[in-house]
Image (cartoon, rainbow, N blue to C red):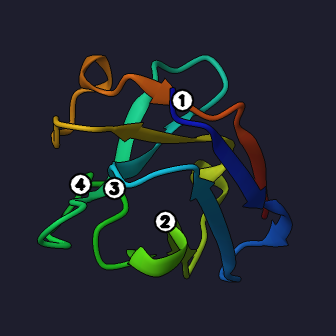
Amino acid sequence: QLQLVESGGGLVQAGGSLSLSCAASGRANMGWFRQRPGKEREFVAAIAHITSVTIYGGSVKDRFTISRDSAKNTVYLQMNNLEPEDTALYYCVADLRRFTQSQYAYEYWGQGTQVTVSS
């Protein structure tokens, strides 16, 4: 069983930046999904455990950066140039084997952290 502990998030003005972090209790492929009000859950970014290869969702590419500290089993999501449309509940995810943009592939989920971007 893998435990995920998220931190970060909060309220920021449009154009600002926020950083999220997620500490896992073990090594895994990790990433982030988000769920905006009235929308389906959406892939944000993921980073592979061994290779640190990254993948991004189309709506955040070039504005968000995912990275990891393997020694701490922690993944970070740096979010720049935030837009009101980025307002969502952000979930940290992890899986021991799968590395994909599909939410159904990830076995472990955090409780979510709220990001609110004001215009």
Amino acid at dot 2: Asn
Q: Could you say whether the residue bearing mark 4 is in a helix, strand or loop?
A: loop
What residue is shown with label 2?
73
Mark 2 / mark 1, whichever is N-terminal: 2
Q: Could you say whether the residue bearing mark 1 is in a helix, strand or loop?
A: strand
Q: Could you say whether the residue bearing mark 2 is in a helix, strand or loop?
A: loop
Q: Residue 36: image x %, image y %? A: 60, 32
For the residues labelled 2 and 1, the Cα–Cα distance comes to: 15 Å
Query: Is 15 displayed left or right of 75 in the figure?
Result: right
Give the foreground label among 2 and 4.
Answer: 2
Mark 4 / mark 1, whichever is N-terminal: 4
* Image marks 2 and 3: residues in contact by CB distance under 8 Å: no
For the residues labelled 3 and 4, the Cα–Cα distance comes to: 9 Å
Is residue 64 something that shows in the picture? no
Task: Determine the residue positioned at 54% across, 78% down.
Answer: 78
Task: Determine the residue positioned at 33% across, 55% down.
Answer: 45
What residue is shown with label 3?
45
What residue is shown with label 4?
58
Mark 3 / mark 4, whichever is N-terminal: 3
* Image marks 1 and 3: residues in contact by CB distance under 8 Å: no
For the residues labelled 1 and 3, the Cα–Cα distance comes to: 14 Å
Amino acid at dot 3: Ala
Mark 1 / mark 3, whichever is N-terminal: 3
Q: Residue 13: image x %, image y %? A: 81, 73
Amino acid at dot 1: Trp
Task: Determine the residue positioned at 54% across, 74% down.
Answer: 72
Amino acid at dot 4: Gly
* Residue 119 against residue 100 in the figure, above or below: below
